[in-house]
Image (cartoon, grey):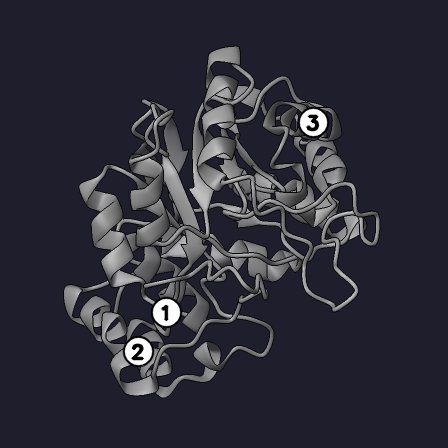
Amino acid sequence: MATSYKSSKVYKLNSGETIPALGLGTWQASADDVYKAVLFALKTGYRHIDSALAYGNEEPVGRAIRDSGIPRKEIFVTTKLAPIDALDPAGALDQSLKNLGLDYVDLYLMHWPVCLNKANKSHPGIPTLPNGKRDIVFDRDFTQTYADMQHLVESGKAKSIGVSNFSIKNLKKLFSSPDYKIVPTVNQVEIHPYLPQTELLEFCKKHDILLEAFSPLGSSNSPLLKDETIVKIAEKNQVSVATILISWAIWRGTVVLPKSVSDSRIESNFNVVDLSDEDGEELNNLHKVKGIKRFVSPNWDPIDVYGED
């Protein structure tokens, strides 16, 4: 049996900044819910909040940060560049800072390696063509977007920059682009025992890029929460399945971003255990039995965002 405790682990980013290993995810949370969730999380001890312009809730996230009374410098705040703003990262970050009511973010990520057509007003965030496919701007490469993002570090508006939903193939393409200067500090991707992303993890470690795990508990009604192997490890350690999944992510050396708007779950998700190597390896290999399963997979056709992963 392992004793659970409140997470306090931090990592050093390649930019020199420090990031808490456990943060609160805010995807799919309404304005009311996210305000209460962020406020409660900060009171519980969280010091890392992960947001995005595309989530549509930056304003209440920022309000909760201010209302918490915790000094700004003690909270690590991430937000993300939406694909619809890929042509203007500087303008998009200014809008996010205005929404959040902050002077800077600790981390600014390219949400997807895709650019969407902002001139198409069919949807404010995900414009589509008459055939239903997303309206992608094909002559704007993500390497150009990243080149523009690099200036945001010089401006001081983003202490660090990084990427999200990047494959090894796309990272290699970024590294070889002519205007590439700043190594991404992180790559935020879906990770859990059914999608361990082991090759990507090793590749990112080799290049001093920290991997961040979103959807670490799976999705709504996730099969992970009922998986007999994970349940067995949780019972052995006398903690919840969620605690095991979150602890596994930290055991692997990744940042983990569980999302909840429930006070009790936000509190329990902040508790971790020191997972044994035996338990960690069993979870590492679970996908070999259960198969690979991705819970978050938007259709970017004809672009294969996850190519070769």
Label number found at residue 149: none
Q: Which mark is nearer the camera, 1 or 3?
A: 1
Q: Amino acid at mark 3?
A: Arg
The image position of residue 141, as x and y in percent, is 50, 40
Residue 57 x/y as whole percent: 73, 44
For the residues labelled 1 and 2, say whether their Cβ atoms are less than 8 Å apart. Answer: yes
The disc placed on residue 287 is: 2
- How many marks can you see? 3
Does residue 98 appear left or right of residue 14 in this picture?
right
Task: Name which residue lies at 42% across and 61% down.
Answer: 306
Looking at the rendering, in which quadrant would you find the C terminus?
A: bottom left
As measured in the structure, the alpha-carbon distance from the residue carrying label 1 to the one carrying label 3 is: 36 Å
Q: Residues within 10 Å of mark 1 (few under 14, many from 20)?
A: some
Q: Secondary structure at mark 3?
A: helix
In three-dimensional space, the C-alpha distance between marks 1 and 2, rounded to whole angstroms, equals: 7 Å
Q: Which residue is mark 3?
A: 66
Up the image or down, 101 lies above or below 222; here it is above
